[in-house]
Image (tube, rainbow, N blue to C red):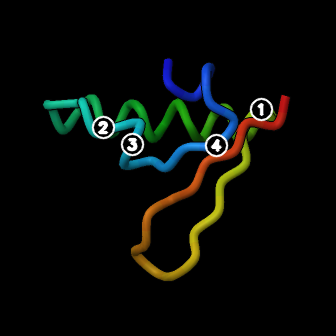
């Protein structure tokens, strides 16, 4: 829901309000599917760093 409003966000911002581990996993999988569909682009500055997500469309 947050990524539909913002053009850029971090994965920790998006998943920050999620309380259950399974919901974090599902959020990450949904992000991967949106990347595959070329709706999102993700980058990471360093190993194990926060993932930056950018909306493409």
- Most extreme residue toward the front, as rendered? 6
- Most extreme residue toward the bottom, as rendered? 46
Q: Which residue is mark 3?
A: 13
Of the two numbered discs 2 and 1 on the same chain, state the one appearing first in sequence: 2
Q: Residues within 10 Å of mark 1 (few under 14, many from 20)?
A: some
Q: How many marks?
A: 4
Frontmost residue, 1 versus 5: 5
The residues tagged by marks 3 and 4 sit, at their Cα atoms, a distance apart of 10 Å
Instruction: Say whether marks 2 and 1 touch (CB < 8 Å).
Output: no
SS of the residue under disc 1: loop
The residues tagged by marks 2 and 1 sit, at their Cα atoms, a distance apart of 19 Å
Name the residue rendered at 73%, 36% in the picture: 55
Of the two numbered discs 4 and 2 on the same chain, state the one appearing first in sequence: 4
SS of the residue under disc 2: helix
Q: Nearer the viewer, mark 1 or mark 3?
A: 3
The residues tagged by marks 4 and 2 sit, at their Cα atoms, a distance apart of 18 Å
Instruction: Say whether marks 1 and 3 touch (CB < 8 Å).
Output: no
Disc on res. 8: 4
Q: Which residue is mark 2?
A: 24
Asked if residue 9 lies left or right of residue 7, the reply is left
Name the residue rendered at 43%, 72% in the picture: 49
Q: Nearer the viewer, mark 3 or mark 2?
A: 3
Q: Which residue is mark 1?
A: 39
Query: Hey, which quadrant is residue 50 in on the image?
Result: bottom left
Q: Residues within 10 Å of mark 4 (few under 14, many from 20)?
A: some
Of the two numbered discs 1 and 4 on the same chain, state the one appearing first in sequence: 4
Instruction: Say whether marks 4 and 2 touch (CB < 8 Å).
Output: no
Q: Nearer the viewer, mark 4 or mark 2?
A: 4
């Amino acid at each position: 829901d947050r990524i539909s409003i913002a053009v850029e966000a971090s994965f920790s911002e998006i998943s920050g309000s999620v309380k259950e581990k399974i919901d974090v996993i599902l959020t990450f999988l949904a992000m991967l599917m949106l990347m595959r569909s070329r709706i999102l682009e993700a980058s990471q500055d360093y190993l194990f760093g926060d993932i930056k997500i950018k909306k493409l469309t």
